[in-house]
Amino acid sequence: MDGVEYRWRAGRRHWCCDYDVRTLGYTVEDAARPGRTLVVETGRPVVLEPGPVPAEVVLPREVAAGIRAARLNGWTPGCDGSPFKLYLSAA
């Protein structure tokens, strides 16, 4: 994205069938030089259902938007440091 390759994944795994009050999230790092990790909370609730496919998914376009928002707010992925947390609204 924008000339930089990133590696990302959904940040939580759940193994039961219920409503979970936590929100759906994902983590991102620079693929070439992992450093400061981006942790994004989407603001959407996690709804758990039986089966291997989650009820809610994080799409690549959402991750791209999260990366751009984090960069505008000071996330420097190639630098060392504690995780950079970005909280998005579900609205």
Image (tube, rainbow, N blue to C red):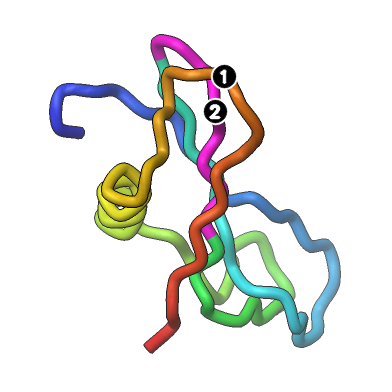
Check the image and report above or below for 34 versus 56: above
Image quarter hosting the C terminus: bottom left
Farthest front residue in view:
74
Residue type at tag 2: Arg
**Whole-Å distance between the Cαs marked 2 and 1?**
5 Å
Camera-nearest residue between 40 and 79: 79
List x then y, in percent, for residue 31. 42, 18
Camera-nearest residue between 7 and 84: 84
Residue holding disc 1: 80
Image quarter hosting the N terminus: top left
Badge 2 vs badge 1, beta-carbon distance below 8 Å: yes
Left or right, residue 20 beside residue 66: right
Label 1 packing within 10 angstroms: few (<14), some (14-19), many (20+): few
Left or right, residue 30 beside residue 16: left
List x then y, in percent, for residue 26. 54, 52
List x then y, in percent, for residue 67. 33, 46
Label 2 packing within 10 angstroms: few (<14), some (14-19), many (20+): some
Q: Is residue 39 magenta?
A: yes
Residue type at tag 1: Asp
What is the number of callouts on the image?
2
Residue holding disc 2: 36
List x then y, in percent, for residue 24. 59, 68
Tell me what residue is drawn at x 64 percent, y 50 percent: 11
Q: Main secondary structure of the magenta part?
A: loop
Question: Which stretch did the figure color magenta?
Answer: 32-40
Q: Is residue 36 magenta?
A: yes
Tell me what residue is drawn at x 49 percent, y 58 percent: 86
Q: Is residue 9 visible?
A: no
Location of residue 18 by image quarter: bottom right
Mark 1 element type: loop
Check the image and report above or below for 50 versus 63: below
Mark number displayed over residue 2: none
